Image (cartoon, rainbow, N blue to C red):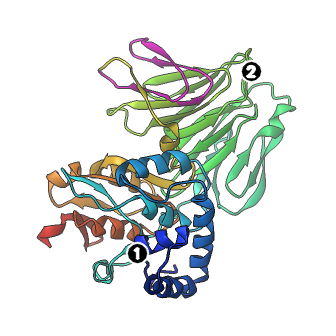
């Protein structure tokens, strides 16, 4: 992967965007601009991005959150995402709260810290289990047509399409199951044209085609749904502890750890969330999230749904999140075991923003830049340590 060996300070870049470079800054900026073609692309995009925005930030933390709110649902373009983060984020070390900067600004001395092997996203195959028990391992870029019942399933790159079953006549619908491994996501278009995105280490079971009474899917892990509206045929998402019922809407369900709770987040429309062991029920409005835990009543919170969908947009977004939760998420993408050198490190909070297709080492470098934590490899185990203890 290409790395920046020549860095530019945000203050100089800010002046360039505003057209306020002095002679000394102009020399430094020109060197950076000519260093890589990507830098020129970044600068042009930055000028457009800040054309109607204030590039002077009095409050970095508020600006960072505003930036996430306004841009997290946009498709990232190359590594420009780093530059935009750097535009609004600085390193804060206050009461254990951190915001990390872009790798554009990493000190050369810090770059020497990380010397272990590059850690890539996991490369296992997606598994599709058909109605007759056949198990197919699907390659990301493979384009195939899979015979199933009296029709076929189309697989094109990262999408599995069941829409051919709309017109098929299947006497008895049969189940299919798709299992997503670490380091992968998958788009599934169901027989009713509902679109589902499945996150890493998730699974979904569904009938092919749906019955005439309901459209029901069962998931583990996390999935985002854009449900095709049909007032006569409710769409139901079932997890181990929760049932979400809709007619047509956009929402996300996270059931990775039911001990912590099942999180249902609504973007558009309306959904009914029911706790299976008690029958408790709530109806969500857009930008609301229901948390269903095993031993407590349903809690509804107001949220920014775009932050919940970072995974669908190919991003890692951490907004004042504990390090323990961050590495739980990272472990579903990168196939590397980890441990904390001290329990107290789990509660340190970070905020930041990174593309998922990068190596884990890039993110670890950003963490180290805060001088809050440091990493080392011990017999293939990634150890998270106190920065001051190494």
The residue that disc 1 covers is 9
- Judging depth in this view, the residue of 39 and 342 nearest the camera is 39
Distance from Cα at disc 1 to Cα at disc 2: 54 Å
Counting labels gives: 2
**Which residue is located at x 44 percent, y 75 percent?**
12
**Above or below 321: residue 38:** below
Disc 1 packing (10 Å; few <14; some 14–19; many ≥20): few
Element assignment for label 2: loop
**Which residue is located at x 71 percent, y 36 percent?**
190
Q: Which residues are magenta?
A: 266-295
**Above or below 327: residue 172:** above
Residue 270 is one of the magenta-drawn residues: yes
**Which residue is located at x 30 percent, y 20 percent?**
296
Examine the rendering and report whether any part of residue 376 can be seen: yes
The residue that disc 2 covers is 230
Element assignment for label 1: loop
Marks 1 and 2, the one that precedes in the sequence: 1
Name the spot of residue 123 as percent of width and height, x first: 52, 64
The answer to which quarter of the image holds residue 175 is top right
Name the residue furthest top.
Answer: 279
The answer to which quarter of the image holds residue 37 is bottom right
Examine the rendering and report whether any part of residue 149 can be seen: no
Residue 160 is one of the magenta-drawn residues: no
Name the spot of residue 271 as percent of width and height, x first: 57, 21
Image quarter of the C terminus: bottom left
- Judging depth in this view, the residue of 43 and 1 nearest the camera is 43
Name the spot of residue 230 as percent of width and height, x first: 74, 21
Disc 2 packing (10 Å; few <14; some 14–19; many ≥20): some
């Amino acid at each position: 992967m290409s790395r920046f060996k020549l860095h530019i300070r945000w203050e100089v870049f800010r002046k360039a965007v505003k057209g306020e470079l002095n002679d000394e800054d102009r020399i430094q900026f020109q060197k950076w601009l000519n260093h890589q073609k990507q830098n020129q692309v970044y600068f042009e995009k930055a000028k457009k991005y800040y054309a109607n925005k204030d590039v002077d930030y009095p409050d970095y933390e508020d600006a960072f959150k505003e930036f996430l709110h306004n841009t997290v649902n946009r498709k990232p373009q190359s590594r420009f995402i780093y530059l935009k983060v750097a535009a609004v984020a600085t390193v804060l070390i206050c009461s254990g709260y951190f915001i990390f900067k872009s790798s554009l600004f990493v000190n050369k001395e810090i770059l020497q810290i990380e010397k272990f092997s590059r850690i890539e996203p996991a490369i296992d195959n997606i598994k599709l289990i058909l109605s007759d028990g056949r198990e197919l391992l699907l390659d990301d870029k493979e384009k195939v047509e899979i015979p199933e019942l009296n029709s076929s399933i189309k697989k094109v790159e990262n999408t599995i399409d069941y829409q051919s079953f709309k017109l098929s006549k299947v006497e008895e619908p049969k189940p299919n199951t798709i299992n997503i491994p670490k380091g992968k996501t998958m788009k599934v278009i169901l027989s009713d044209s509902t679109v589902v995105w499945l996150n890493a280490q998730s699974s979904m079971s569904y009938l092919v085609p749906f019955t005439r009474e309901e459209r029901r899917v069962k998931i583990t892990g996390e999935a985002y749904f854009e449900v095709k509206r049909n007032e006569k045929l409710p769409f139901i998402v079932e997890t181990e502890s929760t049932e979400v019922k809709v007619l047509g809407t956009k929402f996300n369900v996270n059931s990775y750890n039911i001990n912590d709770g099942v999180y249902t987040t609504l973007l558009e429309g309306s959904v009914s969330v029911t706790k299976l062991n008690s029958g408790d029920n709530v109806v969500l409005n857009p930008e609301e999230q229901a948390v269903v835990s095993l031993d407590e009543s349903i809690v509804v919170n107001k949220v920014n749904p775009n932050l919940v969908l970072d995974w669908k947009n190919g991003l890692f977004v951490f907004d004042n999140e504990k390090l323990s939760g961050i590495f739980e998420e990272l472990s579903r993408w990168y196939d590397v075991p980890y441990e904390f050198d001290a329990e107290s490190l789990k509660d340190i909070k970070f905020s930041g923003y990174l593309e998922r297709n990068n190596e884990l080492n890039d993110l670890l470098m950003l963490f180290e830049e805060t001088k809050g934590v440091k990493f080392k490899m011990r017999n293939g185990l990634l150890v998270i340590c106190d920065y001051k203890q190494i």
